[in-house]
Image: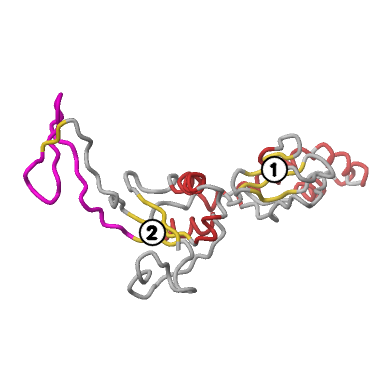
Amino acid sequence: MPVPAFNIPNFIGLYQPPNYRLPKWLTFVQGLCGGLTWRKAIFDAYRNGDAQTEYDSATSYAADAVVWWNYATYQSLIAGNTGNPPDISPSAWMLRCASFIGASERVKYNGRYLYLTWALNRQFGTTFRQPPYPAPYGGPPLTGPPPGTFSDIYITTTVPVNVSFVMYPGDTGSSVMYPATSAPYYLFNSPVYTSATSYEMTIHFPIAAYTALGTTDLIRLSIIDNFVKKYQMCGCTYNVVTY
């Protein structure tokens, strides 16, 4: 059930008894409800989304100013707030919303192709484009889509090959089945072989958007994985390539 949208100061004025609608009484009651008004603003931002201007380290922010930083929004706790990165300055900034995307939108995301493509482009600030797409999908391998045709971040299906699994493990070895033959191979004190191409899907990232995620591949892939793992289907493996 949706939460009704209402303005608390207006609500106070409309529902006060007529003999208490003098400015001094309205100001008094609105002052009492100041905390509720602030909390409702936070709730509305969490529910509907909180689009804010990106934080600039050279800007002096006033108290209560709101900025976007690292996919979250923060509210300034002090006046003259300059050079304090919001995510590591708890005395200068309060976390307002852990995601700039509203909960009413996030709840619709899932691991299906179009939903996940939309979610990835929405999260990382790139452009989503509706199908249909021309064939072949994506042109030459790993070169990315023609400009203006596919979504900036797009997904392709990868057919796993040469995936093996363990059968009847024993104390000194295991029977390992390969898909290329019906006869088992016996490995003694050896790891199970799994091909490097055993992914169900590939997520293609524009190189500029990928590089902006962090200073190392470990950080970048961690940021992507922390988002994708919330929506990917159970057991579905993927890799990330740039173009």
Q: Position of residue 28 (x, y in %)?
A: 88, 39
- Front in this rendered view, residue 39 or 26: 39
Q: Position of residue 32 (x, y in %)?
A: 82, 36
Q: Main secondary structure of the magenta part?
A: loop
Q: Within 10 Å of the Cα at label 1, are there few (<14), some (14-19), or many (20+) other Cα atoms?
A: many
Q: Residue at x 23, y 36 (%)?
A: 191
- Residue bearing mark 2: 113
Question: Mark number for residue 86?
Answer: 1
Q: Viewed as shown, does residue 106 lie left or right of 63?
A: left
Is 23 above or below relative to 155? above
Q: Within 10 Å of the Cα at label 2, are there few (<14), some (14-19), or many (20+) other Cα atoms?
A: some
Three-letter amino acid code of the residue under disc 1: Pro
Q: Helix, strand, or loop for circle 1?
A: helix
Q: Quadrant of residue 143?
A: bottom left
Residue pushed farthest left? 183
Q: Helix, strand, or loop for circle 2?
A: helix
Question: Mark number for residue 94?
Answer: none
Name the N-terminal-most of marks 1 and 2. 1
Q: What are the residue bounds of the magenta stretch?
A: 157-185
